[in-house]
Amino acid sequence: MELRSFKNQVYSELAEMTRALANPHRLEMLELLAQGAASVESIAAETGLSVANASQHLQTLKKTRLVASRKDGKYRYYELANTDVFRVWMELRQLGFSQNAHIEKLIRDFRTEPGTLECVTTDDLLQRLRKRQAILLDVRPRQEYEQGHIASARSIPVRELMDQLNALPRDREIVAYCRGPLCAMADDAVQLLKKKGYRASRLEIGYPEWKTIGLPVET
Amino acid sequence: MELRSFKNQVYSELAEMTRALANPHRLEMLELLAQGAASVESIAAETGLSVANASQHLQTLKKTRLVASRKDGKYRYYELANTDVFRVWMELRQLGFSQNAHIEKLIRDFRTEPGTLECVTTDDLLQRLRKRQAILLDVRPRQEYEQGHIASARSIPVRELMDQLNALPRDREIVAYCRGPLCAMADDAVQLLKKKGYRASRLEIGYPEWKTIGLPVET
DNA sequence: CAATTAATCAATCATATTATTGAATAATAG
DNA sequence: CTATTATTCAATAATATGATTGATTAATTG
């Protein structure tokens, strides 16, 4: 085969895959699927799309093997094809943050609105957990917690937090985490906890990032 | 700001950047620019595009700040905005290789045609260089070598190799490298060297990968 | 079996992307 | 200053993408 033709083919295949990533809804879906498998209906609800539209987008992702799916009863569950897909999403997000001041500003503005900026780093958290200084809280929907969570975390979905406050000790610091740096669940939880007199802060990353860098998880 | 509106804005910005990546010619340009700055004319020639078309693509990359440009005399030189851009390209390429069997097959078929499959790994090369068992050859165009190359490498562009064979000792193994895993220059060089009775093999990665993982380079 | 539910399909319209062409700028050389 | 060279701009046409709609398929429930 001729060199130019070879190059054209390889770059075209890679561009086709990249094009499948290059849509705001599909990026959001990838981040959602990084939490674990989900049905078309739940993905549509979470992203605010119609079911037909969500289904079309998922098929676009599937065509380039970025996601896989299996059918269970009348539901079809989609999931990330492998961890490399999430790695690419992490790198893209990182690049966006470093290149696009507008994105950084959007996040900064959104975060400071509720007045909860303090983030706990991963190293910080590991230390505090070792010294039993902190309690780790997974505030994602329970179904996501059950598909996998950070080792030693307990589950109180942010929607149930108000009703379960008495289950939390007031003498220890609480660290909340959620889906990742773009997710607001942990922010909301921290805001509520602080208002109720707890010492609380959010973890800077989410469950998929924790898992991807190889730190201990449970199922 | 409302949560959905915030998410829509962030994902849209990230998707816009990803869309700038999602074109075969632009991916090829990024790989080329990873070797160093280049003028529009040379990029157009290397990628086989018309100058006007290449210019348009470069402006698409520039709009999302993936590349930067500076004018010098009547030439305008484009270069990667920062190393994160190349990291993303590496991850995308890696994902393509792992997800798309067709891409792997294309590369395997192209490589085995000249019958030169043996690749030297990075660790291998470092060892052999330490023991002075191997000579390292940069076979990219001289202009790229001059913008940066692997420490201790000498430059013989693949086009000049035939005329400079007598400058190479026959008693040591020769390791050739070029632009990266998708580039055929090192393959061509190895093929020629072997035909002339040298022991030769190619490095599995190229200069930009070497530099990105933090190994020693020279300018 | 009919009704319900989850997901996909197929068609359509509006919008975006890309290659091509020729004209317009901008810097340099003679 | 004029000619040349490198690049960009602007307009166009062909093609691709994405949201919407209503119909269809497949599994489950009563």
Image (cartoon, coloured by chain):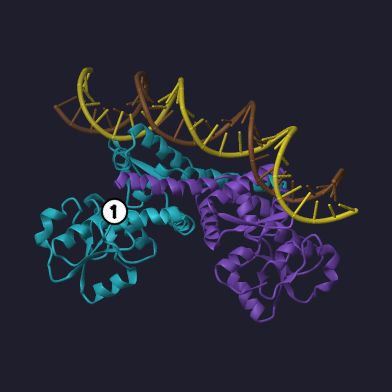
Chain colours: A purple, B cyan, C brown, D yellow
Left or right? Give the position of B87 relative to B155. Answer: right
Residue A160, quarter of picture: bottom right
In terms of depth relative to the viewer, which is nearer, A34 or B73? Answer: A34
Left or right? Give the position of C24 relative to A213. Answer: left
The residue that label 1 is drawn on is B184
Give the answer, above or below, for where D3 lies relative to A115. Answer: above
Counting from the top left corner in percent of width and height, residue D20 is at: 71, 34
Q: Residue at x 20, y 74 (%)?
A: B132
Q: Label 1: how many residues lie within 10 Å, few (<14), some (14-19) or many (20+)? A: some
Counting from the top left corner in percent of width and height, residue C21 is at: 35, 23
The residue sitting at the bottom extreme is A131
The residue sitting at the left extreme is B166
Counting from the top left corner in percent of width and height, residue B1 is at: 71, 46
Q: Residue at x 81, y 64 (%)?
A: A161
The answer to whether one can see residue A134 in this image is yes
Residue A149, quarter of picture: bottom right
Q: Residue at x 33, y 33 (%)?
A: B50
Residue A208, quarter of picture: bottom right
The C terminus of chain A, quarter of image: bottom right
Give the answer, above or below, for where B128 lies relative to A13. Answer: below
| Three-letter residue code for mark 1 | Ala
Give the answer, above or below, for where A172 lies relative to A23. Answer: below
Chain that bears disc 1: B
The answer to whether one can see residue B80 in this image is no
Left or right? Give the position of B24 relative to A94. Answer: left
Q: Of helix, strand and loop, which one carries label 1?
A: loop
Counting from the top left corner in percent of width and height, residue A60 is at: 58, 46
In terms of depth relative to the viewer, which is nearer, B90 or B144? Answer: B90
In terms of depth relative to the viewer, which is nearer, A50 or C5? Answer: C5
